[in-house]
Each structure stands twice: as C-alpha cells, then as structure tokens.
Image (cartoon, rainbow, N blue to C red):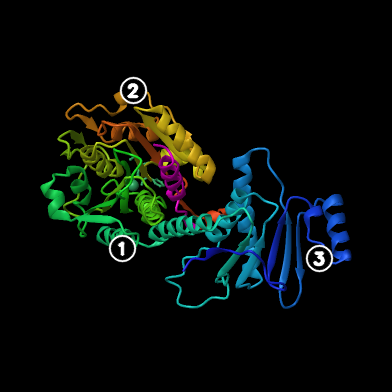
Amino acid sequence: MYISIQKTKKIEPKTNTLYLVKSFHEVNATIFTYEELTFIENESENNKKTSFSFNRFTYWDFIEIVKEKDDHFHFLESLRVLADKYVTIFNETRLESVSIQSESLTAEESLAFAEGLVLANYQFNKYKTNKEAKFNLLKSVLLQNKDVSKAQTEELNIVTEASLTARTLVNEPVNFMTAPQLAIEIEMLAKDAGAKVEILGKSKIEALKMGGLLAVNKGSIDPPTFTIFEWKPKKTVNKKPLIFVGKGVVYDTGGLNIKTGNYMNNMKADMGGAAAVAGAMFAIAKAKLPVHVIGLVPATDNRLNNNAYVSGDVITMFNGMTVEVLNTDAEGRMILADALAYAQKFNPELVIDLATLTGAASHAIGKYGIVAMGSNNEAFLNDLKMSGEETGERLVEFPFWEEYEELIKSEIADMKNIGGSDAGAITAGKFLEKFTNYPYIHLDIAGPALVEKRFNYRGIGGTGIGVRLLFNYAKRRSTKT
Ligand code: BES
Ligand code: ZN
Ligand code: ZN
C-alpha cells in the first residue's frame, strides 16, 4: 500500500538519513567529517548549493539546507515540493527506507515535508504486468522531530491515504469504474472507516424522480447510483450537518453533443469531485473528527445510444423545477442539481460541491487552483480559502453576481442547462445555485483534478485534489463550537 510515516526518537546510525536544516551551522558535526563540513560550508556560502548527498556504500546521507520563505503557506508548499525532489532521488537510488532528521524545522514544517514524501511516492501500477525497474521501492519513512506528536503522524497517514485513494479512483478507467462500481468503492471506504453508507440504485432514483441524473443516464447501459456516506459520531460540534457533494460522471463522452478531437481523452476523471468527497469522508471518519458530515455522490456515465437524452429535451428535476437541455455535454450540472436539491432535506449548515464542471474554469486558472463561488454566507468561503492556503489546494473566488442568471433563462422552461460563450464557469455555478436554499460553496476542479504531466508531489494522472482541503476544513470546524 501507500507509505506511512512513523515517528522516531532516535535514528539508527549508518542508515539512510536526510538531514533537513535551515543553515549549514546546524549540520551535525559528529556525523560528518571536518572535510565534509568545510565542503558543505564552502559550497553553500559561495555557490549557494543547498543539496548534498554522501554515498557511504552501505547507506546514504543527504543534507538539505532548506530556504525559508517570507510567506508561511508558501514555505509549507515549498517543503512538499522539495519532498517530491527527494522521492525521485531516493527511488533512483533504489532506497527502501529512509529517516528524516528535521529537528531544526517546526512540527508543521516537518509534517509538510513528510506529507510531500508520501504523496509524491504514489504510483498507479495496477495494470502493469511487468514489474518495471522504475517502480518505486521506498516503503518506510521515519521522522525525527521532538515537536511532532504521534497523533499528528497518525492523522497525516490517514489524510495521505485518503488523498491517494482518491487518485486511484480517478485513475481507474471506466471499463472498471462504472457508476455501480464507484458506489461499491465508496461503500468499502465508509465501512473501513466505521461510517454509515447507503447506495440508492436505479429504481430508488426513479422513485425519487431524480430527473437530472436519470436523463444523463438514459444513454448508458450501466444504471446510475446515488451514494450517501454519513459520519455522525456521538459528540459533534455542529447541530446541522456539513454536506459535501461530488460530481460522479464516471465517463463523459459529451453524449450526443459528443466531444471531438482529444477533448474526450481524460474524461474518466470526470468523477474527480466524487473521488474527493469519498476520500475526505473516509479521512474524517477514520480520524473520528467530532463533526456531523454527509457526502452525496450522484454517479453515471454520459454516453450516447438510441435512447440518449437530446438537445431540446425538457427535464423535470428532483425538486420539480424544469430544465431545457441545450447541450448534452453540460451533464454535470444535471446530476449535481438533483443532489443539491436532495441535500435540502438535511437542513445543512453548509453544502460544498466539488465538480470537474467546466472547461472554462480550467482555461481561466489552469491546474494551479480551484475555482470557487459562494452564496449566502461569506464567512464560510473565507474559512475554506484558509484551508486552501494551508493545504496547497488553493481557491480563487469568482464573481457570483445575480446578473449572471439572465444567461441561463429559458423561453420554455425554468432555466436552460448552458449559458453561452461568456463566463462558462459562473453560469454553471449559477445553474447549481438555483437548487440550493442554504449556505453554499461551489468548487470547480476541472483544472487541477487530473494532470497529464507530472506536477511535483501531486503526481501524474488523478491528483486527489479536494481531499486535503475538505479534511482541513472539517478539522478546523471541529475545533469551533
Ligand atoms: N466534464 C466537462 C468539463 C471538463 C472539461 C472537465 C475539461 C475537465 C476538463 C463538462 O461536463 C463539460 O463538458 N462542460 C462543458 C459545458 C458546456 C457544454 C456548457 C464545457 O466546459 O465545455
Ligand atoms: Zn460534459
Ligand atoms: Zn462532465
């Protein structure tokens, strides 16, 4: 499985060790020779070199002189990115275990580095039949820092496992990860974490009249699913639940408005929102946070067959509102709208949805952040932005002015499912907002959910974006009453 971090009081001599220091003066003079220390001093002073490695034949010593950044959060992120560099070095050196001596860093800084190591070491090898030489060997990481507690490393292990599990859910192709399979995967995660889970199948979805989810599913041979993951411990800080909703389009062909060229290539990742919700719920339950949280995942593929929904259809949604479909490729909002309306029955404190919703969001800010919009309570979005800074899963707020609503007015129904060429990420958000009556945050993760080239510790393929963000948010919520 994924590597986990173990705290250690003392690192065994003559084992692979990375010393993280803030200046060369902190390099341990009992471990390095006088010549080595002089060399390190010269190279760091004169040539601004920060990384040193010593091949001891039966083991390695590494030294990194960490450069501090003025901005605290930027520094934490730079430590995660630095850890990625070391994961590459450790694996190229074929190391199976390594100890990190980070006494000159704070607990938070040490943990950020450790987090980067675990996340960067992830590989998705399930479908490789050869055990390739380039597979990572790194399995064990010991962390020495007197300020880091066991509870902190345990929490880190839970959150990184959840984040990497979300990557795997995204990386699985649709010929395995169908909507029913996604529901089973979420069910397994909930059971593992000791939480409640319920899977609504097609007949239940029909009985509930979730028209949006059923319309998108019409072109599919697999039934839709609607999964409800609930964590409600005995003691909770919140009276009304927090709800996370994830777009679970297991594959988006576009439907009859079929995606052309290579626009379809990564559309197995169109359930990145669902993966984020599943991962975050798993981590929150496993860490036993005293918060009442519910995860909702509507899932289907968006395909075309003789029965597929078409442009021009008018669909009656779960809450009775009607939608004129003018593009079958704007399917995410159709299934999310039903889930958001369903969320009303829980009388939530806040609902956050995560969705690979629009190419427009991705075009606007790329893979570097999450496009965010919020309504009904500014304070919630400010809190979530703080979680974004802390975790490196940053948010950019887009305007959410009511004027945008004119762009989705329909002549014949309550609204249409596309705006126009302008402000595509916002009109999608405005569409969703119509199905809410509670404090609401919409997160469009179309840019960062999947990357085609390795993107530091975030890896290649599914990034698991959103898991660490939501966990951090729930954790901070759990400390407030
Ligand atoms: N799943 C796509 C959005 C997407 C695009 C995600 C690129 C990740 C990368 C979504 O269902 C979609 O097709 N959106 C359309 C909406 C349009 C028809 C209004 C889009 O963005 O083009
Ligand atoms: Zn689409
Ligand atoms: Zn989609």
Q: Sequence order check: which comes first, mark 2 or mark 3? A: 3
Classify mark 3: residues with Cα within 10 Å, few (<14), some (14-19) or many (20+). few
Element marked by disc 2: helix
Three-letter amino acid code of the residue under disc 1? Met
Element marked by disc 1: helix
Q: Which residues are magenta?
A: 461-481
Q: CA distance from mark 1 to mark 3?
A: 50 Å
| Left or right of 94, for residue 367 | left
Three-letter amino acid code of the residue under disc 2? Glu
Q: CA distance from mark 2 to mark 1?
A: 41 Å
Q: Sequence order check: which comes first, mark 1 or mark 3? A: 3
Residue 43 found in image quarter: bottom right
At 36% from the left and 50% from the top, the residue drawn is 277
Residue 453, percent from left and from top: 54, 55
Question: Looking at this view, is 28 or 166 the one in front?
Answer: 28
| Left or right of 448, for residue 73 | right
At 63% from the left and 51% from the top, the residue drawn is 79
Question: Looking at this view, is 51 or 399 the one in front?
Answer: 51
Q: Is residue 278 above or below residue 72?
A: below
Point out which mark residue 188 bears. 1
Q: Is residue 444 visible?
A: yes
Magenta span has 480? yes
Three-letter amino acid code of the residue under disc 3? Thr
Point out which mark residue 30 bears. 3
Residue assigned mark 2: 402
| Left or right of 278, for residue 304 | left
Q: CA distance from mark 2 to mark 3?
A: 66 Å
Element marked by disc 3: loop
